[in-house]
Each structure stands twice: as structure tokens, then as C-alpha cells.
Amino acid sequence: MGYWELVDAYYRQESLVSQHLESYNQFVEERIPEIIEEHSVIDPEVGDLVIEVKGYHIERPIITEIDGAVRKLYPMEARIRNRSYMASLYLDMIAIRRNVEIQRARIRIGEIPVMVKSNLCWLNGLSPKELVRLGEDPLDLGGYFIINGVEKALVAHDEPAPNKIIVSRADEQKTKIIAQVFSRKGAYTGKTMVIRRKDGIWNVSFPSVLQIRWTVLMRALGFTDDQEILDALIGEKEVVNDVLLNLEQSDVKTEEAALEIIGRQVAPGQIREYQLRRAQEVIDNFLLPHIGTDPEHRKAKGYFLIRMAERTSEVYYNLRPVDDKDHLANKRIELAGRLMETLFVFALRALIRDIRFQVERTLTRRKRIRLQTIVRPGAFTDAVYFAMNTGTWPNRRTGVSQILNRTNFIAPIYELHRVKSPLSKKRKNFEAREVHGTHFGRFCPVQTPEGQACGLVKHFALLARTTKASDPERIERLLRKLGVSTVVG
């Protein structure tokens, strides 16, 4: 059997845009329930009112005519009539006031874009004859959206791998070493850095805390015994010497004193009790949130910071090389599903803010609380429409949503295979623009635009495939079943 027979057999089962379809299906079937569960309690903080979300329902695209007739909305009709191919999202809400249920209803909160040929699409699973009858091209691969009659494609982005330590040199003299990790929990991503200065002192930076001594943060995490830190080391004697240096130059010995230092930075001018409480909240919620956001996870965060500090010293003493930021093992591709997840969380939080405002206004006017009036679908849908129409995403990315090019049959495939780098096109970034060895068989080494975007915009190889995100808890259960135990406790 020749090569082409294998390629032909492969494409009988796979699609050139299957990575986007699988990513979007995972977003709808797995991530939407998880996000709704994370926001299952809406507390307006006025009037002793709490709104609980007990379930959800997604209604596939439909259209309501002027005479009230309701029927299916197919992609071709959406194109012709300049409609948006979107699915309505309903939440089962319960309004509780002073621990008494006052109303229960299924409320439509807005619409989400439906990817053509995904599991939510009416075209999914239809035969070529049925597609022709509906006015569709049987060879159309899907993988795009229809907004106001215009076909829109989401451009994939390559980002640093989350929850993974990356060590690099930060200055020309190569004396300042930084270990950084992009910690991701749900839709939130926060960068934590451990910086080794030329004199061997470690500083830590994370969201809400500009920079603080490593030893102070370790004390705040409960490591008040120096021997406990030394016992956690697995590095060489040079690393041990750096740890001893940091411990000797630290005057902070207790957890409370460390929390006071952090509290003065995150809540300046406040009373001491509030500063201590705020310091604990910042540590739990913003420091390495992927490990956990509860107080019992502080020890695990401390061990993770020890690993980060160790690696900076190992790089400084040439015991290990710096990490290659351009290696694909240190990158992740954010496909349509992940991009839609970011947009969904942003729109849902906009809706929650609007619900709080509507509740406050209703109570001020002394009117009766009704879920149908305090939940406005426009707050959710407007945020989605703005991003899909302008291409500007919540995390300040631009050009995420682009008009699908239909010049020829190859053009939409070319668009959907595009991968964009977050690096600035105005800077040189020679290493990032070069073809990396790990690109072989994954990215096309030739197809890239000329000019400023050269090397920063890549394209998937035709036979390249991306894996879907896995459930970390399932992997942890598998590791424990194989005999792996935690280092904490």
C-alpha cells in the first residue's frame, strides 16, 4: 500500500478542521457545566437575597417568525437573512430570601455562537444528499461561526504552557535568573515569578503583590521551621548554600509577622486585622491557584516555590540549562473551544454584575423581585456579540475573530489552520520567528506571512492534530492508583 492510499483512508475518518470541532464540542459538553457550577451562587449582597443556579439547558438554533411560528434555523438561512447562528442558553434559577424560596424558574440568559458542523449544529451527522437539499456544500468542513450573516473564524493562539515552571535569564549579564509559571485555574490565569538576584537573594512576584522576599512568603505559608525547608531540598550543595543565605538574611521568623508585611503591601493604610485577612485571601486566591485556593493548600504552594527557587540556582551555577520557551512542550495551542471559554466566562460575569445592579434598583424602588425582570439576556449576549464582531477578546487580544476567506476551496482551510503568537510583531524576537526542531510534522515550515508577522503567524501541517485538555483530577486518581503519593503531610 502506498502513501496516498494511507492519506486517503485517513481523511475518510478525519477532517482538516477536526481540532476546532473537537475543542468546541468539549467546551459545550464539559466546560460550560463546570463554569456554571463555579458560579452557581449569585449573591447581590443586598436585601438578604441569594440566587442559586441548579441546572442549565442549551437550545439548538431556532428562529421565531413575525407570526409566532418557531422552527429550526439552518446555517444557509442565517447567511441569506443576515442572522446569527446561535443557541439560546437557559439557567434553572431559584431566588431565596431569608432562607425562604420565593421563586423558581428557567430563565433565558442569552445566546452562544454555534460552530457549523459541531454537535450543536443541525448539519452534524447529515448525509451529502440532505446537505444539498438544505443548500449546503457537502464538502464544506465547518469549524467556523455565522454572526449577522458573516462567516467568522477564530484564530488559534499559542501560549506558554500553564502550570509549568519555565526558567530563563533576564539580563544581558545573565546574572538575574527568573523561574515563572502561568498558573491556571478555570478561566483565571496568574503569573508567579521567583527571581534570583545577583547576590543570591530570592524575591517572589505574583498578582496583587509586586515583589516580596521569598523567605517572607515561605513564613506566611507556614514554613516557620528552617529545617523543614532544608529537608524539602533535592538540589546540590550550591542550592543549599543559597537557601541558607536567604534564611540568614531574613529577620521574619513567624507566620503572623510575614502576613503583616504582605498585608501592608496589599492593603496599605488599613487596620491590622483587615490587612492580615486580606493577606491570607491574596495568598489563597492569587498565589499558584492551580494547586488550590483553600488554606490547607498553603504547604503544597510552599513546596512548589521551593522547586522554583531551586531551579533558578541550578541555572545560575550551570547545573541545568535554561528552558527553551519556543519548544512545543513548553507551549499550548488555544483552539476555538478555549477561546470561547474565555469569552463565556467574561460574558457570564457581566451578566452577574448586571443582576446585582437590577436587584439593587428593584429593592430601591420597593418592587417585587421577579427573576424574569432582574435577569436581562442582553447583558450576556452583548458581550458575546462585541467580541465576535470586533475580534477583540476579554484578555486584550485583538484579531481573534476574523472574516472567513472564501476566495477558493483552500482559503477557509488555510484560515482555520492559522496559529498566532502573542508576541509583538514590532520587536525582533529572532528565536521565536525561526523554525524550531519541534515544529517538524506539526507546523508548516514554509507557510508564514512576509513582513512584521513573519514567523509569528504559523500554520498547522495538514496531518497535524492537537489533543484535547484532560481532567487533572482523573490523571491524579490514576497516579495515586499507580502508587504515587503526595509530598505534603
Image (cartoon, rainbow, N blue to C red):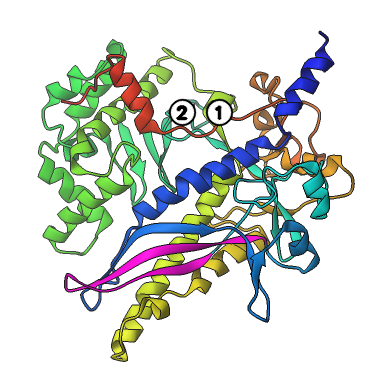
Name the residue furthest top.
1
N-term-proximal mark, 2 vs 1: 2
Quadrant of the image occupied by residue 485: top left
Tell me the chief SS of the magenta region. strand
Quadrant of the image occupied by residue 15: top right
Residue 277 screen position, x and y as percent? 17, 55
Tell me if residue 259 comes above or below residue 253 in the rendering.
below
Residue 4 screen position, x and y as percent? 83, 17
Whether the magenta-drawn stretch holds residue 298 is answered as no
Residue 18 screen position, x and y as percent? 67, 36
Tell me if residue 45 comes above or below residue 483 in the rendering.
below
Q: Which quadrant: the N terminus?
A: top right
Magenta span of residues: 85-110
- Near mark 1 (Cα within 10 A), the count class, few <14, some 14-19 or many ≥20, is some
Give the CA separation, mark 2 to mark 1. 7 Å
The circle on residue 325 is: 1
The circle on residue 37 is: none
Instruction: Specify the amino acid type for callout 2.
Output: Ile
The circle on residue 166 is: 2
Name the residue furthest right.
408
- Near mark 2 (Cα within 10 A), the count class, few <14, some 14-19 or many ≥20, is many
- Contact? badges 2 and 1 (CB < 8 Å): yes
Instruction: Tell me if 488 is positioned left or right of 289 in this view.
Output: left
In percent of the image, x 83 and y 47: which residue is there?
137
Name the foreground residue: 220 vs 395. 395
In percent of the image, x 50 and y 72: which residue is there?
377
Whether the magenta-drawn stretch holds residue 89 is answered as yes
Total labels drawn: 2
Residue 228 screen position, x and y as percent? 14, 23
Instruction: Specify the amino acid type for callout 1.
Output: Lys
